[in-house]
């Protein structure tokens, strides 16, 4: 399994969901939560999409939540110091 490709795919899916949910919110005036973005990503994933398997590791939802928060805050696009 190519973990870098998997991470890039999940980031792209999360970015798309952020744009869709935020766009819908802008057009309707209805507020959204990060969980709404996570739900949108999860609904779009194929049934066999990999999930973390290590005991005690973050869940896929935790990873998507973190990605969505970083996209919304702009942190994902900042250059590391």
Image (spheres, grey):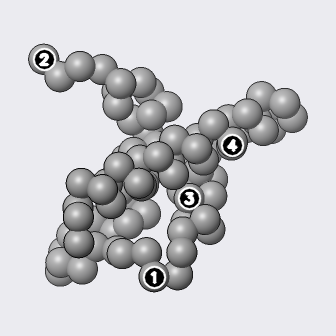
Give me the residue at 77% from left, 28% from top. Answer: 26
Contact, mark 2 vs mark 1 (Cβ under 8 Å): no
How far apart in space, not on screen, are marks 2 and 1 (Cα)?
Answer: 37 Å
Q: Earlier in the sequence, mark 1 or mark 3?
A: 3
Instruction: Pinpoint residue 33: horizontal percent, then vertical percent.
Output: 61, 45
Asked whether residue 23 is in view, the answer is yes
Q: Earlier in the sequence, mark 3 or mark 2?
A: 3
Q: Is residue 74 above or below residue 63?
A: above
- In the picture of the structure, the residue carrying the numbered disc 1 is 48
Labels 2, 1: front one? 1
- In the picture of the structure, the residue carrying the numbered disc 3 is 41
Q: Is residue 65 left or right of residue 44?
A: left
Residue that sits furthest to the right in the current view = 28
- In the picture of the structure, the residue carrying the numbered disc 4 is 21
- In the picture of the structure, the residue carrying the numbered disc 2 is 81
Asked whether residue 39 is in view, the answer is no
Q: Secondary structure at mark 3?
A: helix
Q: Secondary structure at mark 2?
A: loop
How far apart in space, not on screen, are marks 1 and 3 (Cα)?
Answer: 14 Å
Q: Earlier in the sequence, mark 1 or mark 4?
A: 4
Disc number placed over residue 39 in the picture, else none: none
Give me the residue at 28% from left, 73% from top. Answer: 52
How far apart in space, not on screen, are marks 3 and 2 (Cα)?
Answer: 30 Å
Residue nearer the viewer, 24 or 7 = 7
Q: Earlier in the sequence, mark 4 or mark 3?
A: 4
Q: Is residue 7 above or below residue 76?
A: below
Q: Earlier in the sequence, mark 4 or mark 2?
A: 4
Residue that sits furthest to the left in the current view = 81
Labels 1, 3: front one? 1
Screen quadrant of the C terminus: top left
């Amino acid at each position: 399994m190519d973990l870098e490709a998997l991470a890039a795919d999940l980031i792209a899916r999360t970015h798309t969901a952020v744009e869709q949910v935020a766009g819908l919110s802008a057009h309707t005036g209805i507020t959204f939560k990060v969980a709404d973005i996570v739900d949108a990503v999860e609904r779009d994933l194929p049934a066999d999409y990999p999930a973390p398997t290590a005991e005690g590791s973050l869940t896929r939802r935790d990873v998507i939540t973190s990605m969505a928060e970083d996209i919304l805050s702009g942190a994902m696009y900042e250059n590391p110091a």
